[in-house]
């Protein structure tokens, strides 16, 4: 039952995210009304126009999340580069120090405002995300067409 609920949640979140991202990319389409992807631009030829960085949840892996791409079938995603990195394996305090893929340490669950936090780990994870984004910007993808998404530990509470 737990895994079914988790699957349905994942499905709902992915479909919701697909709709939001498609709408966002449509808004960024040039005023000509042409989809952004078909506007000819010599230096962008053969290149992706948007980048989606998807961060998995605690204990999961990037490759296991890759099928999520299949939910994003709108034409807006034709020239989207996807990245599903895997978190480094490290001991997780709230799981008795068990080593698993984790973006940063979690001391206790549920977390509250007073929970101890792995500030260094979070900052390092943020730096890694920034490095991945900077690389795509350097490769010519407009910063406004870059989306960071994820589930649970890899999640954000909004897509912007
Ligand atoms: C565009 O994105 C796709 C899907 O992520 C990837 O396979 C391809 O290598 C990317 N193309 C370039 C030129 O980066």
Image (cartoon, grey):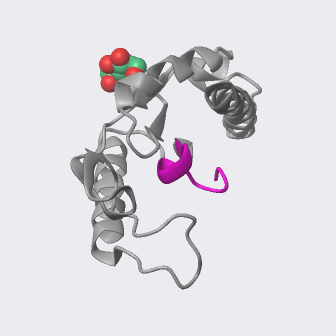
Looking at the picture, how far across and down is residue 69, in whole percent?
A: 54, 20
Left or right: residue 45 versus residue 4 is left
How many discs mark residues in the rendered view? 0
Residue 158 on the magenta span: yes
Question: On the image, which quarter does residue 70 sit in?
Answer: top right
Looking at the picture, how far across and down is residue 111, in whole percent?
A: 55, 70
Question: On the image, which quarter does residue 121 sit in?
Answer: bottom left
Left or right: residue 111 versus residue 26 is left
Is 46 rendered above or below residue 23?
above
Is 140 rendered above or below residue 143?
above
**Residue nearest the observer in this picture, 11 or 130:** 11
Residue name at image x 70 percent, y 31 percent: 5
Residue 107 on the magenta span: no
Looking at the picture, how far across and down is residue 120, in whole percent?
A: 28, 74
Residue name at image x 70 percent, y 33 percent: 9
Left or right: residue 115 versus residue 71 is left
**Residue nearest the observer in this picture, 11 or 25:** 11
**Residue nearest the observer in this picture, 58 or 122:** 58
Question: On the image, which quarter does residue 140 sit in?
Answer: top left
**Visible in this render: residue 130?**
yes
Left or right: residue 79 versus residue 63 is right
Q: Residue furthest bottom?
A: 114
**Visible in this render: residue 45?**
no
Residue name at image x 28 percent, y 54 percent: 131
**Quadrant of the image where one finds ligand 1:** top left
Q: Which residues are magenta?
A: 149-160
Looking at the picture, how far across and down is residue 38, in whole percent?
A: 59, 17
Residue name at image x 69 percent, y 27 percent: 1
């Amino acid at each position: 039952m737990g895994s079914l609920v988790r699957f349905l949640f994942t499905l709902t979140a992915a479909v919701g995210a697909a709709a939001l991202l498609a709408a966002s990319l449509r808004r960024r389409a040039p005023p000509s009304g042409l989809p952004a992807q078909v506007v000819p631009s010599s230096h962008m030829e053969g290149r992706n126009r948007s980048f989606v960085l998807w961060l998995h949840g605690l204990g999961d892996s990037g490759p296991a999340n890759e099928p999520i791409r299949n939910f994003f079938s709108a034409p807006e995603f034709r020239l989207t580069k996807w990245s599903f990195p895997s978190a480094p394996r490290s001991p997780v305090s709230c799981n008795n120090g068990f080593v698993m893929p984790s973006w940063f340490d979690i001391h206790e669950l549920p977390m509250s405002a007073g929970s101890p936090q792995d500030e260094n780990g979070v900052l390092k994870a943020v730096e890694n995300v920034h490095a991945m984004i900077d690389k795509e910007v350097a490769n010519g993808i407009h910063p406004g067409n870059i989306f960071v998404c994820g589930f649970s530990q890899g999640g954000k509470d909004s897509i912007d």
